């Protein structure tokens, strides 16, 4: 079964396994709304287009305003923290919610579009010295 469009990856190129998205295609046009990174410092370095910020430690799910029928893709550096938020959102009764497989690291390593504000950039916050090794060196922002 196909998942939603996401920042230029057409629906037919976004595979879905449960509530995890696997991206196989190349950018082509506008897509689903990402629910932001889980660390404000990471969000300031780069993010998916139009991403909302959620704090992994206190996501304040009750304060979210998600339009009925909207598709939301949650992501973080590698997908671990965002998977926990997806579970909380599901428990809160929010449908059409997905975790981005491989997180922003895989997205950036595959040269997909990332932004700082509205400007396209190529660097990602490395999260820490260990997880940062999962990023290509030319994608790793200086701490």
Image (tube, helix red, strand yellow):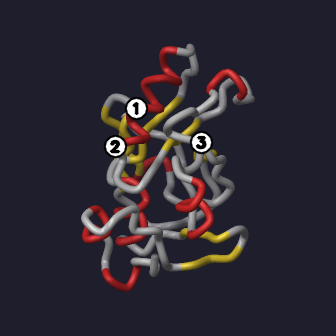
Q: Which residue is mark 3?
A: 54
Q: Position of residue 122 (x, y in %)?
A: 50, 79
Is residue 1 left or right of 67 when viewed as pictured? left
Task: Please tell me which residue lies in front, 112 or 54.
Answer: 54
Q: Which residue is mark 2?
A: 80
Outermost residue to the bottom: 138
Q: Position of residue 136 (x, y in %)?
A: 31, 78
Could you say where residue 88 lies in the image, as x and y percent from the top left?
Answer: 48, 23
Query: Looking at this view, is 56 or 101 the one in front?
Result: 56
Residues packed near mark 3 inside 10 Å, few (<14), some (14 to 19) or many (20 plus) = many
Specify the quadrant that holds the N terminus. top left
For the residues bearing labels 1 and 2, Cβ distance under 8 angstroms? yes
Residue 30 is situated, as x and y percent measured from the top left of the image, at: 64, 57
Q: CA distance from mark 2 to mark 3?
A: 14 Å
Give the numbered dot on residue 84.
1
Picture disc at residue 50: none
Q: Is residue 94 above or below residue 85?
A: above
Residue at mark 1 to residue at mark 2: CA–CA distance: 7 Å
The residue drawn where x is 50% and y is 54% is 10
10 Å crowding of disc 2: few (<14), some (14-19), many (20+): some
Q: In which quarter of the view is residue 137 placed? A: bottom left
Q: Residue at x 70, y 29 (%)?
A: 64
- What SS does tag 2 mark? helix
**Tag 3 near tag 1, CB within 8 Å:** no
Q: Residue at 45%, 39% (x, y): give it.
A: 3
Find the distance from the CA under tag 3 to the CA under tag 1.
Answer: 12 Å
Q: Earlier in the sequence, mark 2 or mark 3?
A: 3
């Amino acid at each position: 079964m196909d998942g939603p469009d996401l920042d230029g990856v057409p629906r037919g190129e976004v595979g879905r396994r449960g509530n995890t998205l696997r991206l196989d295609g190349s950018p082509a046009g506008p897509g689903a709304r990402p629910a932001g990174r889980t660390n404000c410092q990471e969000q300031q370095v780069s993010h998916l287009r139009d991403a909302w910020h959620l704090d992994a430690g206190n996501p304040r799910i009750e304060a979210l305003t998600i339009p009925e029928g909207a598709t939301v893709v949650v992501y973080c550096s590698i997908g671990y923290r965002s998977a926990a938020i997806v579970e909380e959102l599901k428990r809160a009764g929010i449908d059409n919610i997905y975790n981005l497989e491989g997180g922003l690291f895989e997205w950036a390593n595959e040269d997909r579009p990332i932004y700082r504000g509205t400007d396209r950039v190529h660097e990602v916050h490395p999260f820490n010295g260990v997880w940062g090794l999962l990023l290509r060196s030319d994608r790793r922002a200086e701490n």
